[in-house]
Amino acid sequence: MTYAAPQAPASGPTPLSQPLYGASFGQAFARFWRKYVTFSGRASRSEFWFWYLAHFLVVTAITVFMIIGAFAGMTTDPLTGRNEPGPLLGVGALLFVLWQLATLIPMIALSWRRLHDANLAGPFWFLGLIAGIGGIAVLVLCALPSNPAGARFDR
């Protein structure tokens, strides 16, 4: 049985307590930070996937910065011949760790809300902790279409 995604109301913005169907990249990014650690309610597929795109882009930019920082200022030890990375590698690593720490809990909350929108209980997220296919299983569950019965998770 397939379900059509509910449409956003024609009048006014969608409240944060409701999923924003058809969210743009910017809307999804903003809603992620506004609903920082909110585990109740639902998140639309567009909110979920646009945030993961934003996360991927930020992580990629930090990684490129780390690579450039490692090569810029690289030195070679004359005794051993070993290359030592430049000091900006450490700055990039610090940025990477801070970004991951700042987004860890909110990303779990977003996935939790996305599972709610598919009418699945949030604790299905813990399947992702199973080595091997757990993360893939959670991504597949998050890709499921919206189910109107998921409204039971709204406050």
Image (tube, helix red, strand yellow):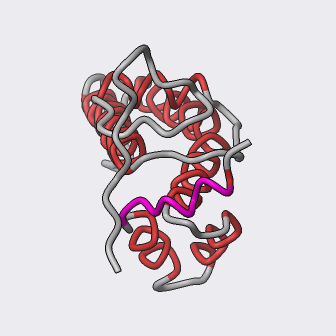
Magenta segment boundaries in residue numbering: 145-152
Locate the C terminus by quadrant.
Answer: top right
Residue 85: x and y, percent? 37, 36
User: Which of 62/155 is in front?
Assistant: 155
| Residue at 70 percent of width and 38 percent of height | 38
- Viewer can see residue 117: yes
Find out whether residue 41 is within the magenta segment.
no
Residue 153's spot in the image, x, y percent?
68, 54
Picture layout, residue 31 above or below residue 84:
above
Instruction: Tell me if residue 77 can be seen.
Output: no
Magenta portion: prevailing SS class: helix
> 43 or 11: which is nearer to us?
11
Q: Position of residue 54 (x, y in %)?
A: 34, 35
Q: How many marks?
A: 0
The correct choice, above or below, for 110 with respect to 72 in the image is below
- Magenta span includes 147: yes
Which image quarter is the N terminus in?
Answer: bottom left
Q: Residue placed at 26% from the left, 24% from the top? A: 72
Query: Residue at coordinates 34% horizontally, 23% vertically from top-left?
Result: 10
Question: Left or right of 153: which side holds 151?
Answer: left
Across and down, in percent, residue 41 comes to 64, 45
